[in-house]
Image (cartoon, helix red, strand yellow):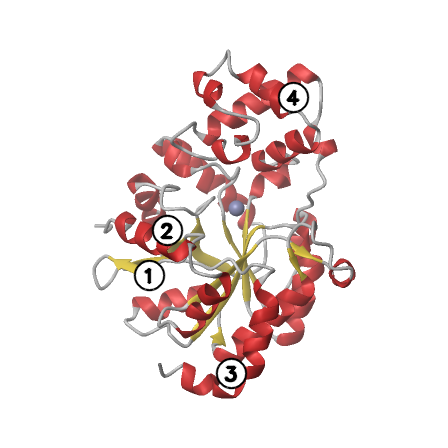
Amino acid sequence: MIRERRGDERTRSGTAENHRPLWARFLNHLTNPDPLILLYHELQPPASASRSDPTGDGIPFSAFERQLTLVSRCRKIVSVDEIASRLQHGESGRDLAAVTFDDGLDSVRSVALPLLERLSIPATVFLTTCVFDSELMWRDQIRVLGEQDLVERFLAFASPLVTEFRAMTPTAFVRQSKNPEVVGSKTVLQLLERFWRHEQLDPATLSTRRYMELSFLKTLRSDVLQVGNHGHRHLMLSTLSDSEQADEIERAEEYLNELHLGRSQLFSFPFGGPDSYNRDSLGLLLSRGYRGFLLSRAFRPAISGDAERKFVGLGRTIPLRSVSGLALQWAKQRGKRAGTIQNH
Ligand SMILES: [Zn+2]
């Protein structure tokens, strides 16, 4: 029932796309016939952006604001669910854009939300809900290892226990640890938990990453922000059994059910590459009433299923901070021609 898209996705996100200049890739998304779905994670507050800290984590506020302004000049910004709905009804998404955030970092609350409200731009934040259990998400645990200079120590600890860790190197560890062809994310998480116990360290006290709190989200009423499911522990679903995948989806749903915000019917796969899900993942989502899924890379929308029960897969674009200056320049040059861009 679900059409395989892997070959197409690799073509779209493969070497040809990656070797094009960033600004060309960005402009292509504004002029190409597919819906433009932006994916953000961390944003820097306006104060740090004014210091233009090149080492800061996330997109500077000024770049975020410029990107939204640019996109809203060229396309109508709607919710990502509306894009899915229109495609499912056979309509074009060429004049549409959407704003999404993954993970639920606190800068969505403190930096993005005031601007989204001021500009009346709808957005969807896909939450990693283990943080509501006071658990440090496993990618943040990896981050702490690096910040505390503990990577070599962790690999020495893990290598005798799981053979796959023997092939990892400290410099490539961050990348290798999320490659499902090297080791599954659940295995990495289990080893991390054993390591912290062995070292008698609490990684949560060492992490600087902040997420939106459940108490805030429970009281939030918003006309612009809706929430969605990004899995409970941010594990790569393709490396899990069917029941483990169901558990990741259901545990996140339980938290989303506690909120009074609009709810996306799309699922955002953690990591969002073509290898981040499998047929079990899609079957589970279908059976639980989702209308589709989101990836973290650009690929052409895929729709499968019969007329009554269509299922849609959508690619997304991660805007980079270095694009902002060119994007603003382009907006000045091309802004008046926005009407013609939609008719390409
Ligand atoms: Zn994520």
Could you say whether the residue bearing mark 4 is in a helix, strand or loop? helix
How far apart marks 2 and 1 lie (CA) works out to 16 Å
Q: Amino acid at mark 4?
A: Trp
Q: Residue at x 53, y 23 (%)?
A: 190
Is residue 90 or residue 23 the one in the foreground? 23
Q: CA distance from mark 4 to mark 3?
A: 53 Å
Q: Which mark is residue 15?
A: 2
- The answer to whether residue 114 is left or right of residue 264 is right
Disc 2 residue type? Thr
Sooner in the amino-acid sequence: mark 2 or mark 4: 2
Dot 3 falls on a residue whose secondary structure is helix
| Among numbered discs 3 and 1, the one appearing first in the sequence | 1
Is 243 placed left or right of 6 in the picture? right
The one of 298 and 241 positioned closer to us in this rendering: 298
The residue beneath circle 4 is: 196
Tell me the SS state at disc 1.
loop
Number of the front mark, 3 or 2 = 2
What label sits on residue 334 in the rendered view? 3
Q: Position of residue 117 (x, y in %)?
A: 65, 71
Mark 4 vs mark 3: which is more N-terminal? Answer: 4
Q: Nearer the viewer, mark 4 or mark 1?
A: 1
- Within 10 Å of disc 1 (Cα), the crowding (few <14, some 14-19, many 20+) is some
